[in-house]
Amino acid sequence: NLGGGADYGALTNCLITGNQARAGGGVGDATLENCVISSNLANSSGGGAYYCVLSHCLLTNNAATNAASGWGGGAASSTLRYCQVVGNTSAHNGGGVSSCQVTNCTVRANTARSYGGGANGGSLNSCVLAENTAAEYGGGMDNATLTGCVLSNNAANSGGGSYAGWLSNCVVLNNRATNNGGGADRSALLNCRLNGNSAAGYGGGVHRGAVIGRSDAIG
C-alpha cells in the first residue's frame, strides 16, 4: 500500500505523524507545503514521503525499515524545496533522502545502515548535508550529484562526506572515515574546497577520486 497517512492530493499546514505503509509511510503521491511529517514508517521506500512534491516541510524521525529494500528514511523518489530533513533512518540506503531532487534544503543527523547517510542517489542543489552517518559508504551522500552544497561533519566507514558522487562548487568540511576517504572516496570534485577531513586509512581529503579545476584539498 502507498501513503499511510495520505495518498494523493494537496496538503497545506498539516501534521502527518505515526502512520505506516509499504511505501510512503507518512504520505504518497501528493503535494505538500508547510507540513510536518514525523515518526512514520515504511517497510520499503520513503519512511516519511514517497513520490511527493514538498515545499517548506519538516521531515523528522521517519524510518524505512526493510534491511534489503528500505530506501529513503525521510523521503524517496520525491522533489523537495526549502525543506528540513532531520533525524530519519534507513535500514538500507539513504537515511535522509533517496533518489530525490533536492534544492535549498538542510539534510542533517540522518542514518543509513548501508549507503548514503544523508542522501543516496538523485541530485542536490544549494543544500547543507551535516552530521549524517552511514555504516558502510557515504556518510553525507552516496552516488548523488551535488552542486553548490556544503558537506560537513558526516561519517562513514569509507567516504565520510561523499562516496561515488559528483560534486561541483561544494565545500567538504570536517568529515571522517574509519577506513578511506574522509572527505570523499571514489568521487569527482570540480571547483570544490576540502578542509579538516580525516581518515584512519588512506586519503584524509580524497581517496581514489578526481579533483578537477580549482579544487583545493586540505587535510
Image: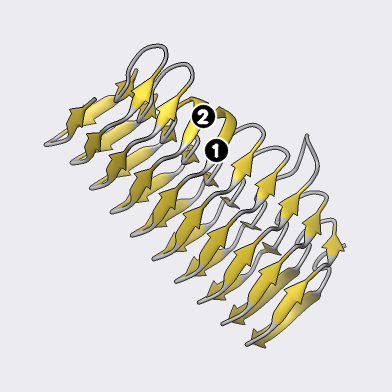
The residue lying at 45 percent from left, 39 percent from top is: 154
Residue 187, position as x, y percentages in the image: 36, 30
Q: State the residue at coordinates (54%, 56%).
A: 100
Of labels 1 and 2, earlier in sequence is: 1
Q: Position of residue 25 (x, y in %)?
A: 78, 62
Q: Is mark 1 on a helix, strand or loop?
A: strand
Separation of residues labelled 1 and 2 (CA atoms): 6 Å
Instruction: In this rendered view, identify the residue nearer to me: 155 or 83.
Output: 155
Image mark for residue 133: 1
Residue for point 71% across, 80% down: 15
Amino acid on which the number 2 mark rests in the picture: Ala
Check contact, mark 1 vs mark 2: CB within 8 A: yes
Say which of 206 and 61 sits in front.
61
In this rendering, the answer to whether 36 lies above or below 107 is: below
Q: Residue 2: give x, y in percent of width and height.
A: 82, 65
Residue 70 as seen in the image, left or right of residue 207: right
In this rendering, the answer to whether 52 lies above or below 90 is below
Residue carrying label 2: 156
